[in-house]
Image: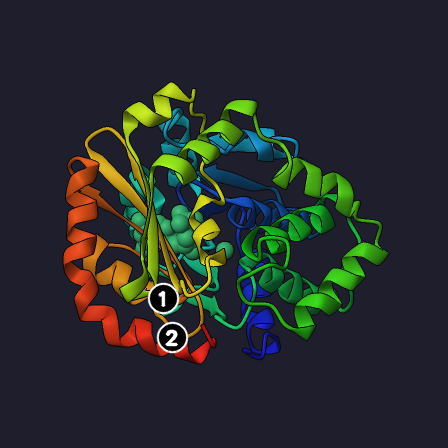
């Protein structure tokens, strides 16, 4: 775990010295990306400063209840406004990503900006795209890192309802409500404080994890029944959903959230992959158990990245390309997959 105290002075000075602060999160923002960004802004407000917020594309519907989401500029749909805010910014804070391609179409505008830049993130091996990099892979979520940073800056817990809720959303998102991902005693002490501050965990749980359409539940059933492949010799399993499958089930953004994790509950499986076909390319989500490095596989095969146990990437073309490619590289990972299975006792 990093010593967050080492960063507070420089961070505070940057905030104090800046008049046009901009926060940006990664494309397809999840609860952690949105939560970290929304929470950071709440603290910046206490310094007598405003901060703009950009998301490279739209937030998923189930996050829209969060306080201040109406202030987030969706760059994909409002490029002109987004570009103007970026141009004006003298401080840009990048949240929950470690490489500039995660900013989608906003990337070129951000890279062209002479503003000072900060990265706050928990992904491994951050690219050096910021003047100040606050990166800690030992945190459950960027939101947990923001919580610690703000506690240091604030000389104590920051008690603000929207802040606390946003942090809680980030932590439960990245840990699947404490089912997977990385969390430890510090995470739980933070969660304890958030609950003491009055965060309504049941309300948040319902909004984040129990807020799906009936079509989505049927898509899940269809995926498991018709589109699941288990490869016991590789301790791997995958689900593949074509564009037509998604259309048939009236797919909405966010409907396949959580599908990537499902197959890790099969005995013996330490690698679970979800292939989702989009227009002209396939999105790949990888989840793993133990020491198997899904990030390395994603970087190598799908031009992607992420964490050791949760990564993602893309591949051009129809879904068959991506699935065939995956199956063709699997033998190279067999030793690592066997070792991970042994390690986690499967
Ligand atoms: P998900 O599978 O939920 O989309 O993403 C899982 C993890 O992988 C997240 O930490 C996310 O930041 C990362 N990730 C997902 N897609 C990509 C991608 O296309 N490129 C990179 N570098 N990381 C990704
Ligand atoms: Mn995250």
Is label 2 in a helix, a strand or a loop? helix
* Residue beneath the point at 24% across and 71% down: 334
Q: Quadrant of residue 307?
A: bottom left
Q: Horizontal and vertical percent for residue 237?
A: 34, 54
Give the mark, 2 or 1, whose residue is nearer the N terminus: 1
Q: Is residue 312 left or right of residue 205?
A: left
Name the disc covering residue 340, or none.
2
Name the disc covering residue 316, or none.
none
Q: Give the CA separation, mark 2 to mark 1.
A: 25 Å
Residue nearest the observer in this picture, 250 or 65: 250
* Residue 53 in view in this figure: yes
* Residue beneath the point at 47% across and 61% down: 121
Q: Is mark 2 within 8 Å of ligand 1?
A: no
Q: Is mark 1 within 8 Å of ligand 1?
A: no
Is label 1 in a helix, a strand or a loop? loop
Q: Is residue 243 left or right of residue 327?
A: right
Picture quarter with the N terminus: bottom right
Picture quarter with the C terminus: bottom left
Foreground label between 2 and 1: 2
Which class describes the residues within 10 Å of circle 2: few (<14), some (14-19), or many (20+)?
Answer: many
Seen in the picture, residue 207 relative to 33 is either above or below; the reply is above
The reply to whether the C-beta atoms of the residues labelled 2 and 1 are less than 8 Å apart is: no
Which class describes the residues within 10 Å of circle 1: few (<14), some (14-19), or many (20+)?
Answer: many
* Residue beneath the point at 84% across and 50% down: 198
Q: Horizontal and vertical percent for residue 261?
A: 47, 52
Name the disc covering residue 126, or none.
1
Seen in the picture, residue 99 relative to 291 is either above or below; the reply is above
* Residue 44 in view in this figure: no
Q: Horizontal and vertical percent for residue 266?
A: 46, 57
Seen in the picture, residue 89 relative to 196 is either above or below; the reply is above
């Amino acid at each position: 775990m990093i010593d967050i105290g080492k960063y507070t002075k420089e961070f505070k000075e940057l905030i104090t010295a800046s008049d046009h602060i901009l926060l940006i999160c990664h494309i397809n923002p999840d609860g952690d990306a949105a939560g970290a960004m929304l929470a950071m802004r709440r603290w910046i407000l206490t310094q007598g400063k405003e901060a703009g917020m950009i998301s490279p594309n739209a937030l998923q519907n189930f996050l829209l209840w969060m306080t201040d989401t109406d202030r987030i500029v969706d760059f994909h749909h409002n490029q002109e406004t987004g570009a103007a805010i970026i141009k004006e910014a003298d401080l840009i804070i990048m949240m929950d990503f470690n490489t500039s391609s995660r900013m989608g179409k906003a990337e070129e505008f951000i890279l062209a900006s002479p503003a000072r830049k900060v990265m706050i993130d928990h992904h491994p091996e951050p690219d050096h795209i910021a003047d100040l990099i606050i990166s800690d892979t030992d945190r459950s979520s960027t939101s947990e890192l923001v919580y610690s940073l703000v506690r240091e800056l604030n000389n104590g817990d920051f008690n603000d309802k929207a802040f606390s809720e946003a942090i809680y959303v980030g932590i439960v998102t990245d840990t699947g409500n404490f089912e997977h991902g990385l969390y430890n005693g510090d995470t739980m002490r933070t969660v304890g404080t958030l609950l003491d501050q009055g965060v309504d965990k049941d309300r948040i749980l319902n909004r984040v994890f129990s807020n799906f359409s009936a079509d989505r539940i049927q898509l899940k059933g269809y995926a498991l029944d018709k589109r699941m492949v288990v490869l016991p010799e590789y301790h791997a399993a995958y689900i593949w959903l074509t564009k037509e499958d998604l259309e048939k089930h009236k797919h909405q953004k966010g409907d396949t959230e959580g599908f990537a994790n499902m197959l890790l509950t099969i005995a013996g499986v330490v690698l679970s992959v979800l292939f989702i076909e989009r227009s002209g390319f396939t999105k790949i989500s990888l989840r793993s158990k133990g020491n198997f490095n899904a990030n390395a596989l994603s970087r190598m095969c799908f031009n992607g990245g992420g964490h050791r146990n949760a990564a993602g990437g893309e591949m051009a073309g129809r879904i068959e390309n991506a699935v065939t490619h995956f199956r063709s590289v699997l033998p190279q990972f067999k030793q690592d997959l066997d070792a991970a299975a042994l390690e986690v006792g499967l």
